[in-house]
Amino acid sequence: MKILVTGCNGQLGHDVIKTLKKRNIECLATDVGDFDITDALAARVFIEAYCPDAVIHCAAYTAVDRAEDDEENCRRVNVLGTENIAAVCADIGAKLLYVSTDYVYGGGSEPHEVGDPVAPINVYGKTKLEGELAVRKHTDRFFIVRTSWVFGKNGSNFVKTMLRLGEQRDSLTVVCDQIGSPTYTPDLAAVICDMVTTEKYGVYHATNENTCSWAEFAAAIMERAGLKTRIIPIPTSEYKSRAQRPLNSVLSKRCLDEAGFERLPTWQNALDRYLVELGVSKDGA
Ligand SMILES: NC(=O)c1ccc[n+]([C@@H]2O[C@H](COP(=O)([O-])OP(=O)(O)OC[C@H]3O[C@@H](n4cnc5c(N)ncnc54)[C@H](OP(=O)(O)O)[C@@H]3O)[C@@H](O)[C@H]2O)c1
């Protein structure tokens, strides 16, 4: 099996390639320097030349706040770019795994099931949902994997921001009423690589297990990194950000169980391993 991966200079793509290589699966890492996914011809020429059996599509416009004032570019990458990839996959008979987001949901109070109504409340979420529709329009041989609160070694994320601010500040205000599941890229990459080698097409949720608020996540990061910064919980209404975010980002993993895929470890376990990977702690203790 031959797999082409987009977005490999980003957090998830980096670990997807690492995982495929570890499993001795033939693969090709790509990013915007190889071809721009918004250029239909460039995408077609590049992908057809490699002729993969599957594409794992991790490339995306992921700047959630910036997207509010940059809707056109965000939509071009997340919708047109995905449409270009999906069209080629359909033509060459390749499977397509598209990584989507918890931000396709609007809120509620229960863990979201994959069949629940979607109602994105920010530009990024809307364009990622339109990307899902572009995938479905072109092929039936798709996996749509909705994930949340991603952190990995290759890129910036909430954990790195907290570690930096923890060195500089005695206290930090962090939102306490948005609930979700942090997700470590090597764990997400593992289930993605499991999936793509099967024919179990469909929509999935994949995050680390257990839930928390951003404030609880921040406190756990400070504690595990040995930083003394005090986390002051505040409601979303007191935190100024350009994009609105759903209060409930919790995703049910029943879809993974039913298809026979393993759930990911807890986010606490993942955070321990991440801090070791970053060299912040030696043994995860
Ligand atoms: N990060 C999260 O918290 C989160 C949460 C839920 C879902 N997701 C989804 O998970 C996936 C992976 O996220 P991530 O955090 O790994 O993203 P990331 O670190 O931002 O990486 C995205 C990669 O895509 C590349 N890219 C952007 N525009 C491109 C284009 N026109 N052509 C080719 N490549 C392009 C970026 O290159 P440049 O850096 O050069 O632009 C970057 O290397 C995405 O689909 C994202 O929507 C992420």
Image (spheres, grey):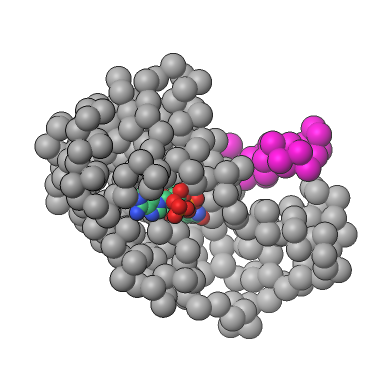
Observer-nearest of 109 and 278: 278
Q: Which residues are magenta?
A: 264-285
263 above or below 252? above
In the rendering, at what x and y percent does residue 226 appear?
Answer: 86, 50
In the rendering, at what x and y percent does residue 269 appear?
Answer: 67, 39
At 49% from the left and 46% from the top, the residue drawn is 10
**Horizontal side of residue 251 vs 229, given as left or right:** left
**Horizontal side of residue 76 vs 167, given as left or right:** left
Is 77 covered by the magenta stretch? Answer: no
Say whether residue 267 is visible.
yes
At 41% from the left and 34% from the top, the residue drawn is 29
**Horizontal side of residue 117 vs 138, given as left or right:** right
In the rendering, at what x and y percent does residue 172 appear?
Answer: 76, 70
In the rendering, at what x and y percent does residue 139 appear?
Answer: 16, 42
At 83% from the left and 68% from the top, the residue drawn is 169
Observer-nearest of 267 and 82: 82
Quadrant where the N terminus sits is top left
Observer-nearest of 102 and 15: 15
111 above or below 245? above
Quadrant where the C terminus sits is top right
Is 276 covered by the magenta stretch? Answer: yes
At 81% from the left and 52% from the top, the residue drawn is 223
- Quadrant of residue 124 within the rendered picture: bottom left
**Horizontal side of residue 134 vs 66, given as left or right:** left
76 above or below 203? below
Q: How many marks?
A: 0
Q: Residue furthest left?
A: 91
Say whether residue 145 is visible.
no
